[in-house]
Amino acid sequence: MSLDIAKGILHRCFRCGYCKFTFDFTDFNCPAYKKYRFESYSSGGKMWLIWGLINNELKMSENLAKILYSCTTCGNCVENCKFEKFNDFWVDIIEAARAEAFKQGFGLEKFKTFGEHTAKEHNPYLESHQNRLDWLPGDVKMSDSANIAYYVGCTASYRQKKIAQDTVRILNRIGIEFQLSPEEWCCGSPLIRTGQTDIALEQAQHNVMLFKNAGIKTVFTSCAGCYRTLKEDYPRKFELELDFEVLHLTELLERNIEKLEFAKLLNKTVTYHDPCHLGRHANLYDSPRVILKKFPEINFVEMKKNRENSTCCGAGGGVKSGFSDWALEQARDRLLEAKEVNAEILVSTCPFCNRNFIDAKNEFNIDIDIFDLTELLVEHMK
Amino acid sequence: MKKDGIIKALKDIVGNDFASNEPEHLYIYSQDPGASLPRPVDFVVLPKTTEELQEIVKLANEEKIPITPMGGGLTLSGLVIPVKGGIVIDLKRMDQIIEINRYSRYALIEAGVTTGKLLSHLKENYPDLEPPIPDAPPSATVAGNVLIHGSGYLSQKYGDQGAMVNGLEVVLPNGDNAKLGSCALSNYWFAKGPIPDMIGLFLSSFGTMGIVTKLSLQLQPKPKCRDIVFGLMKDPNNIPELLYQITATDLAEDVLLGMQDKPDWMKGYVFVMTYITAEKKEDLDPQVKLFKRLYRKAGANYMKAPKKMQDLYLQKPIFAAGAADYRKGGGFEYVGANMPLEKIPEAYIKGAEVSRKFGIPPTLGSRLIGGTHNIVMFFSYSFNRADPDDMENARSALEETNKLALELGGIPWKAELGAQKQILKKMDPNYKKLFFRIRNLLDPNGIMNPGNWEEV
């Protein structure tokens, strides 16, 4: 969505404030409003600021860019705004305004750096593209003739490598044939979220062609951000035609649930954190829970804020990069919510959430174990 | 002191993160969701404690800077947009529920507690108690609604929310902190008196007398079951008798009336909605029968409420903000006017005429407050925020409606500047004199939301 198109609907925001809350109003659930407390930081406040920008009542500025970039794009506003055919577009409008910030030279320096790097090396982590598959263990079986492809994504390729390694091990154990490509590029998510859509489009077009040329019918990801981007942004934002279905790993595993056999009991209290890009953005809540509940002897508990009401981990929308201390504070608060229900383990299904939780655990010395679901599966499966 | 010095002083009081004079924040605080034109703001500050607020008020007094307190900012009538610039004090960081007293049935809260927060806190921790709830989004503050004599759920039975206040803590214009009500001499915020009652000075005075930091609000027992009995009547002249009979049963928790052109089947009718309660579901049935009979006698027909409508009106809070999206324009404002019941038929008939004159589909409603002693009438005008002419049209409709309300013997509620002036023009001169004398005594420098309740 461009700001020109946004102009046609932006005035519908009444600034009633439902977007700040959880469903039951127990807490503010808009991360930026909860932190900064100026009305300007609420989702409605941002809509009005963008309206002011479009109508030349405000100029783009460092402070306006900061307000726009404080949004984790968690989608709580989308869930809680009650104005139909408007509420779907909140995140799109924020992203369009961020694109305008970039255009006018107010993109955050860190974002510019990873954007430029991604244009050349196809990852935002300032790593070399040729090292993309360094994580891949030598003993993993893959099949060039498989029509299922694992899209690994940048975080699991370069940072949370264990998630990628555990993902392929799980597939080997349950006998699902797949392939992956050293030529996959960044999905574009960090670029879209921070307003660098031109570079994101290049990445997206490349990835779509890559899968098309390989005759892929199903692409699965182990990353919530990649999943949302491939599944939602490619067809909707970039109008790319996908010849393949996009699944999250947990959906693929749920389809093969009878093949998951366990060798060890999990005698622990476990809770699940819904990554925003999987939950609120893509409405995928059940598959991870179905799998978790298969673990023998697991004591699965929900946190008070779960599913559509989930608290954001704090890493999304460029916040981990742009506001790193605050991203950690948010992850800390979420871990404390897990502690409130006596969870010993917090599981997520997003490498980015996982990274932020581990960082917060270490920074604030919180006694809880953090696992990606893949890691927990590998430890407990036959 | 120059602006640089003032912002520094404000930041020294509340910390760097909670005071600003950056244009983006000033832009947002210079307007509200109603139809008022924006008015400039110089500073925004968000105190966390009463002590911080006292320091801010003292600073404003020394520097003679206007201050405008703000809660949820949802009156729609521009009461939190400064008239003469200065500092907007956003109180929403003062958001602690200090005490729920179960036996004396009150909530002691800070001024920034939202209705949503209080509602959910009680639901979780005191499920047998409930607060009065305005017909406003959950981001409206409890204090904000109390301080404008707001109405809502439970108003028919217990009066407006101003009537449900047991006590206030107020920062006065000189920075003093005063406790009003039983809390002035007791640890229990259980009653207004029996001591000279000064709480009323701070209600509907829109921050011109002081800034409320804490308040005690009466809570009520929560019935286990609730339903609505819906009816339609063709002739608004039947309203007074119908409401007289409904309230005589002593069974109605709330009573709402409305007239609107959409959906089509409601056009030309006034609907009535009586909220009934019981401990057991089956105990609701005889009440429904009783009200059916009563409706018929008073010229109204019982009708089973459509599910969508039932859901809408039984949810708490009612999604009143939906009116803003009625024409997909993002805006609405209404004249709320407290009126004597006998003038309500005329209010419906003439209110609809005003709406039509301004080309806005009539959307009228009313809610009983404390039996038939008082009824608040809503004349609602939706507008397109993107169209300045449409907003101007809404403002004109509001102005004319305020005039109508006063002509009918009513009083515009949470009156915007134009309505305040109309009220003052009509007000008994000695009431006015007394009000201005007290105000000048408390606020000799005229820093408290100046421009409000002022004659030209």
Image: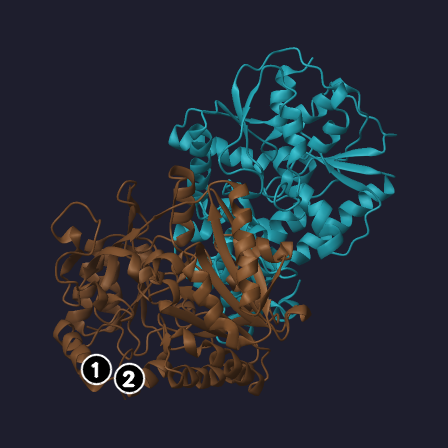
Chain letter for cyan, please: A
Give percent across and percent down for residue A239: 77, 56
Question: From this viewpoint, is residue B450 visible?
Answer: yes
| Tag 1 residue | B432
**Quarter of the picture holding the N terminus of chain B:** bottom left
Which amino acid is tagged 2?
Leu
Judging depth in this view, the residue of A190 and B430 nearest the camera is: B430
| Tag 2 residue | B424
- Direction from residue B123 to residue A55 in the image, left or right: right
Q: Please report, as a chain letter, where disc 2 is located.
A: B
Judging depth in this view, the residue of A269 and A332 nearest the camera is: A269
Give percent across and percent down for residue A142: 80, 25
Instruction: State the SS at label 1.
Output: helix
Image hue for chain B: brown
Please tell me how crowded label 2 is: few (under 14), some (14-19), or many (20+) other residues with Cα within 10 Å. Answer: some
Same chain for labels 1 and 2? Say yes or no.
Answer: yes
Please tell me how crowded label 1 is: few (under 14), some (14-19), or many (20+) other residues with Cα within 10 Å. Answer: some
Q: Is residue B200 above or below residue A334?
A: below
At 73% from the left and 27% from the top, the residue drawn is A253
Instruction: State the SS at label 2.
Output: helix
